[in-house]
Amino acid sequence: KGAKAIGERLRADFYQNKNNNNAAEKKVQMVVICGKNEQAKKELKEHDWGDLPVHVEGFTDQMSEYMAASDCIVTKAGPGTITEAAIRGLPVMLSSYLPGQEKGNVDYVCEGGFGAYSKQPDVIASTISEWLRDEQKLAQMSAIAKTMGNPNATFEIAKEILHMLPDQPPRKTSTENEASEVMDLTTTV
């Protein structure tokens, strides 16, 4: 339902309205990732998208590549996807969240200024179209998203956990080990 609403809006705003400056200036495409939902994948592949280029994919391990090629993303408020989108500088349109555990993610994105939230497919569609028509707003949201992402978070968390372990000597990182080996080589030569 959401993908179809977005597709119809993008087609209307960027392809069908010949008097619209956006139609002449910028062509858009849409990628829909259905995950393991084979029924949605089948239905969306069979849908008539008109002249809007649409690529429908099921489960994929190429999400990083899809995000790298995207201007924005529509997703549920999962923390992993929001984090990866922020690191990539992608404005995020949130369409749902799990009550309790993901509600804070909605606030983080919306109050952080790099996204919006709605459950309504028409609102999601108009928001995405608005972002794509306003390159300045899209660039501003992208810049904010990048400030909210922390690409080293996993390493920082692991380091903190290691420091919590009792009586554990600090481990050298692979870079420190390589530097140590180089030092050993230079002192023995």
Image (cartoon, rainbow, N blue to C red):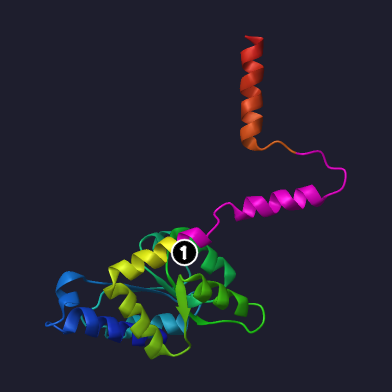
- Give residue 70's position: percent from left, percent from top: 36, 65
* Residue 91 image offset from top left, x and y in percent: 42, 69
Q: Is residue 167 left or right of residue 43?
A: right
75 sits to left or right of 14:
right
Residue ranking furthest to the left: 19
Evaluate whether residue 108 shows in this view: yes
Q: Residue furthest right?
A: 167
Where, by quadrant of the figure, is residue 101 drawn?
Answer: bottom right
Q: Give the range drawn in magenta.
A: 145-170
Give the image location of residue 27, x and y in percent. Answer: 22, 71
**Residue 174 occupies quadrant:** top right
- Residue 93 in sight here: no
Which residue has dot 1 on it? Answer: 145
Q: Please name the residue shown 33% across and 75% down the image.
A: 131
Q: Is mark 1 on a helix, strand or loop?
A: helix
Q: In this view, does 94 lie to the left or right of 22?
A: right
Vertical relation: 57 (above or below) 171:
below
Three-letter amino acid code at disc 1?
A: Ala
At 87% across and 43% down in the image, what residue appears?
167
Circle 1 residues within 10 Å: few <14, some 14–19, many ≥20:
many
Q: In which quarter of the image is the C terminus?
A: top right
Determine if the magenta segment contains residue 64: no
Residue 139: x, y in percent?
35, 64
**Furthest-top residue in view?**
189
